[in-house]
Image (cartoon, helix red, strand yellow):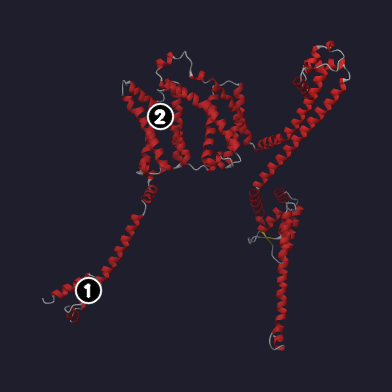
Amino acid sequence: PRGGQPQEAAMRAAHAGYQPLPTKETAPLAQSGGSRLQEIGNRMARKSTCNDLLGSESRKSSKDDADRPPEDDEEEEREASWLQFVERGWFQCIGAFCIITNLVMMVVELNDPTTSQAMFWPNQALMLFYIFELVSRISYFKLRFLCGPLSLVAWNVLDVCIVGAGVVDQWIMSFVPDPSPAAKIVIKALRMLRVFRVFRIMRVLLEADLSWTDSTRFQSFMGAVIGLNAILMGLETDIHWAGWFYIENVLLTIYVFELVVLLKRHGRFFYQCDNPDLGWNILDTMIVMSSVLDSWMIPFIDLLLKSMQDPADHREKAGGCNLGQAMMLIRMARLMRILRLVKLVKAVRPLLFLVVGVIAALQGVVWVLVLTIVSLYAAGIVTTRLIGHGLMFHDVTDVEHAILEPFISVPESMFTLFRVMSGMVSEKEAYAIDELMKTVPSVKFAFVFFMVTSSWTLLSILTAVVSENMISTTQQQYEDLKLALFEEDRVIQTKALSQLFSDLDKSGDGLVDGQEVENAMKDEKFAQDTSVLLKMPKRDILDVLKTLVEAEHGSKGVQMQQFVECLIDSRSPVTERSIMRIESRMKQVIRSTMTLNQQMQQGSLRPSVGDGGGSAAAA
């Protein structure tokens, strides 16, 4: 009973971490049997310390979790969600297909209102898909659907508006038996909102990875489409068929898709001045936009205006001027589709080189044309004064007017002489020249001199300048292409040669034995394949191998990589770069020889420098 207070004090000390109490009451307890209680207090103190450490770790972890941004947790939760298919490419492609189908159905329904009954259930199915997609996206993104980045929220709000307008138009308003005029206006406005579903396709394109647009397959596909379109344009001109309309729209869809994905891929660089394809890009944009205006925008606006009007009003205005007649001038832009043939020139590289050569040749042609015009101008002045003004005739009144008419003025004389030079003289001009030669025979020498200087000399100079400029420009284009593809061609050839000579490495150590290569080259098929790949005769290949084997004297063979690279480099002619490489290697050999010589001299002189003369020499 008297130890109650000291025991309580010891328990409090144990709970507090067992700190010795500086009181006189705890000493008798510690000395007379309080060691048991002290041990208990130590155990409880250690347990309390462990709890404190665990608590501090828990508080630290809680603090780290608190400092962690909630977006990371949402991202991990979305990755683990089964709704992540809404961001997959296949689901976005399905959505784009449904949107295109819906737009086609809408256009058909606007063009032919009698098909509205047949389009009812397909429209309902598409609406159910839109609702499923919207609900899935809301469940997947949750709060981030409307509180995330501005670009994502903008597209989401547009989706909600479009789907909501479709629900009101197709489902809610169908239960209104006799809508009021205000309700009719609302229905028409909601139907116009259905047009904005096309922006959902834009969203799919903006979120997709478009790196495949730079691949060879896509470019080859577009080249095939352009070639097919060029053939179909000629058939469409001569053969009248209702199916051309649908084929034209399919091709236009492909062109619009190409332009959009290229704009998304290259961004602002697509129209920047430092883009080497800026001219082609602007021309492509003009061609596609003119076709869109003619084939899609004008008919679609016409259909929308018809859908906004009542049938009675439409019947009253049927006899008036419609939109097609008012935009007759714009419809003439249909001829701009012929510019798609320019895309064919761009798609086929040899045609592109030829066109670039012709454009470059025009720079030299300009001066030849100037010389031709000056020559025709001088000859026109002379012929006008001599023939047109009658200076070469004794009595101009006796000369028939038909002889003077082609040379009555300087422009007329220049045009007549140009037609004579090009061999396209009309009957009137031929009659005038023949009668002139009969009247004044000496004029024949003047016309001979003119034909020699104009047709033979000027036209020959023109042809030579054009040919020279085209050849030089085309050669430069091929050189640039070869330089751009040099590394790629080298990698392909290295891989092909390594695969071709891999069978010769029986031991698998990466070495090529000279005797094995000589034996393999005795096989005609192997030698022919190697010669065709390297564009080298069989003898040169063996010479390269012999040179490498002599350089690697004492080794078991030549490294495969070294052998292949030497074979590829041996095809190139000797250039300044080759001489520089030889000089660099010779300098390296000279430096190595001098270093070795110095080391040998130092080794021979070192024994005579030591202490003890003879003993050092003996050593």
State the image quarter where residue 186 is shown: top left
Secondary element at tag 1: helix
Q: Is residue 352 above or below residue 186?
A: below
Q: Amino acid at mark 1?
A: Ile
- Specify which label sits upstream in the sequence, 1 or 2: 1
Residue with the most extreme top position: 398
The part of the image, by quadrant, that contains residue 187 is: top left
User: Would residue 149 appear left or right of 279 to someone viewing this image?
Assistant: left
The residue that label 1 is drawn on is: 40
Q: Quadrant of the C terminus?
A: bottom right
The numbered dot on residue 193 is: 2
Q: Residues within 10 Å of mark 1 (few under 14, many from 20)?
A: some
Identify whether 73 is placed above or below 218: below
Residue 335 location in percent, x, y?
59, 25
The answer to whether marks 1 and 2 mark residues whose Cβ atoms lie closer than 8 Å is: no
Residue 119, quarter of the rendered image: top left
Residue ID at (37%, 42%) = 145
